[in-house]
Image (cartoon, helix red, strand yellow):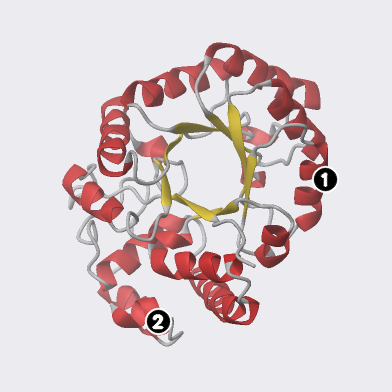
Amino acid sequence: MQRPSFSYICRNVTTFNAHGEFDGAAFGSFLERFIQPKIGFYVASSGSGLGQALNRDDLSRIYQIAVAVGKGKVEVGANIPEQYTSSLSIEHAQLAAAAGVDIINIYGPDGRHGFRPTDDEYRIYFDRILAEIKYPISLCPNPTLGYLPKPSVIAGITNTYTQVQNVILTGIKGDDLYFFNLMNALKRNVDVYVTESGSLNMLSMGAAGLAGNLANVVPKTYRSYLDLVAANKIEKAGVVYAQIRQLMQYVGQWIGGAPRWHLMFMKAFKLPGGEGKLPDPYLGYGDAEVARFAKGIIELNVPEISEM
């Protein structure tokens, strides 16, 4: 029996030129790669997309280009960086809404200097935002912020505000119990996206799909994996899942920011934006390190990479 098709939400790379400035032409070309495999893009995150390094004009252009490339073809989301105050999140969300994105992803308050909101503080943060932003919203309780809110808190916000259309559980690695508890607490039908680790379990338990940043480099591999799961071809899906997990393990050697290995891949395989330079404070890597990276990733024998 064929299951419903699964989606993938990609935290997209932002492309830069040789001076570390946003490269709009390369960005549009980079995003075109996601249309055929039906991979949704959430742009300008503070991780993969270096959203915190971009000024207001660049952010507006990024949202506009994403809408021009993907609107009506894949889901186009603004993955706005985490902010310290609700007023800053509101301001940024309004910028994304003005560009016409399909949905706006909002994190909880930034956990700077060890800050961890109480349950009430977390709820009030979103009460203030969602009272003003009447636009499709995605919530992401990502533990890389420095804390992980309870599933009941996320469910409570989602149950209260109908503009919340999905919840994204990236960063909660392999924890299907968090997913299970969230699903049980939800009283509305919203999409819940999970990370790759343990995804076979969670997709079978009702997850709408996956979210992450590895599809920046292998979008067709993710589409293959999700389609095989939907078709109940679990043995074949397991083969592709193993390829994805090997890739995740390999790129994990370059810790401290996904943009580092993203750019090395883009350089090695001549993807749009590969000739660029990351903005401060990233220094990037020289040709020898790019060559070492490429050699190791080719040896993983992932078909999509071999075709490149």
Q: Secondary structure at mark 1?
A: helix
Tell me the residue at 77%/32% (across/down). 187
Residue 126 visible here:
yes
Q: Secondary structure at mark 2?
A: helix
Q: Is residue 132 above or below residue 176?
A: above
Assess whether mark 1 and mark 2 are in contact (beta carbons under 8 angstroms): no
**Number of numbered labels in the structure image:** 2
State left or right for residue 275 relative to residue 261: left
Front residue of 38 and 1: 1
Front residue of 16 and 196: 196
Front residue of 144 and 93: 93
Amino acid carrying label 1: it is: Asn
Tell me the residue at 42%/36% (across/down). 52
Position of the N terminus, as image quadrant, is bottom right
> Which circle marks residue 98 in the picture?
none
Q: Mark 1 sits on what residue?
A: 181
Tell me the residue at 75%/57% (across/down). 175
Q: Mark 2 sits on what residue?
A: 303
State left or right for residue 74 relative to residue 278: right
Front residue of 256 and 57: 57
